[in-house]
Image (cartoon, helix red, strand yellow):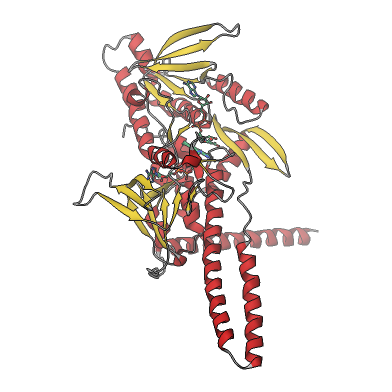
Amino acid sequence: KPKKRFRILRNAWRLTWGLSFLGAGWLAYSIYETRFPQEQIEPDPAKKTLVILGSGWGSVALLKKLDTENYNVVVISPRNFFLFTPLLPSCPTGTVEHRSIMEPLRHIIRHKKASVKFYEAEATKIDNERRVIVINDLSDVKGDVHQTEVPFDYLVVGVGAENATFGIPGVREHACFLKEINDAHKIRKTVMDCIETAMFKNQTQEEKERLLHMVVVGGGPTGVEFAAELQDFFEDDLKKWIPDIADDFHVTLVEALPNVLPMFSKTLIEYTEQTFKDEKISVRTKTMVKNVTDKHIEAEVTYPDGKKELQKIPYGCLVWATGNAVRPVVRDLMSQLPQQKNSRRGLAVNEYLVVDGTDGVWALGDCSATKYAPTAQVASQQGAFLARLFNSMARTQALESELIHLEELSAKTKVQEDRESLEREIQKKGKAIRRVKTLSPFEYSHQGSLAYIGMERAVADITWFNGNLASGGSLTYLFWRSAYLSMCFSTRNRVLVFMDWVKVKVFGRDVSRE
Ligand code: FAD
Ligand code: NAI
């Protein structure tokens, strides 16, 4: 028996070593591959020009799987990186560093087989008639040319959405948003400014309370996750290093509907609201913000008896997370197409993501109006679908020209045997074309929803064998972390995010202003 036990232990030890060795080998190979891309081929100028707008979830998923040697690919986006938005709420508090969730677009395109052109610019107009895009260089450094036109044969619009404000006065002037990396910087600066200003000599108690009141408007996942991260920051770090704010620092989440996280199941909504109560985050549901000034929000509160009251809520930092609105460039394209006149949420598309009323223009992600929620999951699946579509279009075209060539040869051939052999080849090609051409319409496969709710807890509504699995708590939090780590764009991002989490566990978060 001791011998058997020894053998089991020895084998387990060998297996551990073997797996570690494999893991280290895989990591080393991924790093090598990332650092040393292969030579790229120049695309054939005779091929069609495919322009991709945006460098977000949809466009990058398309780019990742696209065989770029089949087209002249041009990417246009005002930001030269991909942003892993699911971890953006962790950035303002320093749980995750900004650069850990950014992947340079230059890395992505440099790894493609054929080179891809990138212009860091905003598309200001898509001219569907003339088939050109007007682009504008937004950077502070301007060259002699900072506005020009890019022609296209095929166009994919993946410009995402902008922040919805519903025209509420004062939001754009006074609130911070949470969509881009600059927004995270701004929130961080504002929170730390509020804290240090509250500590200024002779500050009145009333002003101190206002400055330390952090208000988050919008109880969707963005608002919930950010409020949770902010409260964690306060509990774990701020309170310890700046004890004078302990009694007055307060996070409030304001939501117009009767509950937060409407897309989650009822039990998880209740669990989230209870967790927020334990964390001392105030949740004010049925409270709709109507006006924002530099120091207050004015909100209409609906009481259980149906009575409404307008309340003034003072704030120091206001984070606005009330969902998406259509970008001007998309609205302009919609106005050019009569088929889009009834669409409100974005570009109406067919089941192959072709923009209604156009030929050779596709839209994906948050700028398109489909029956799916505007999420990264949907956008990236649409991107992968379009890559398959473009790859199969190119393959069909190549097969069709081979078929024409074979038919010409067969017509010229006098020898019966050669003609028969060519006929067989023609039949094969015809079959191959039919196979490649049969691409089913886009279908979304929902993997589930996850959200961080603070105190190392998360909620998850996961699709499980055609059913639904709802779970919340610390184990779900571990699942949340591992899922997001595996979803990070590259090995580099994965390693950086993991190191950030370890760093915060060991040293805590930094409390200096940026
Ligand atoms: P985006 O990813 O927004 O990309 C749009 C791109 O277009 C950007 O590169 C932008 O710079 C560029 N662009 C903008 N204007 C122009 C222009 N005029 N011309 C050219 N380019 C332009 N979804 C999930 O499924 N799970 C999550 O956990 C999750 N967490 C999120 C957390 C936060 C804080 C936020 C804000 C969103 C989160 N989402 C999540 C939603 C998800 O990020 C979006 O649904 C997704 O980014 C949509 O992808 P997209 O490609 O359509 O747009
Ligand atoms: P959202 O649209 O999901 O939620 C916005 C909330 O703001 C709504 O509940 C709305 O009732 C509320 N609201 C609107 N106007 C208001 C007002 N004037 N006063 C008070 N409340 C008001 O927006 P969010 O959270 O930005 O998410 C956008 C998209 O990104 C969604 O599709 C979401 O699913 C996705 N996302 C997913 C995440 C995840 O899966 N973990 C994380 C973040 C976003």
Which residue: 45% across, 60% down? 31
Residue lying furthest bottom in this view? 415
**Quarter-wise, where is residue 293 in the image?**
top left
Left or right side of 36 for 343: right
Of 487 and 264, the residue lying toward us: 264
Of 496 and 149, the residue lying toward us: 149
Which residue: 56% across, 40% down? 370
Quadrant containing the C terminus in the rendered view:
top left
Of 408 and 507, the residue lying toward us: 408
Vertical side of 115 occupied by 242: above or below: above
Q: Give residue 475's position: percent from left, percent from top.
A: 63, 37
Left or right side of 462 for 91: left
Vertical side of 17 occupied by 143: above or below: above
Q: Give residue 331's position: percent from left, percent from top.
A: 42, 38
Q: Is residue 138 visible?
A: yes
Residue lying furthest right in this view? 1
Of 119 and 424, the residue lying toward us: 424
Vertical side of 328 occupied by 360: above or below: below
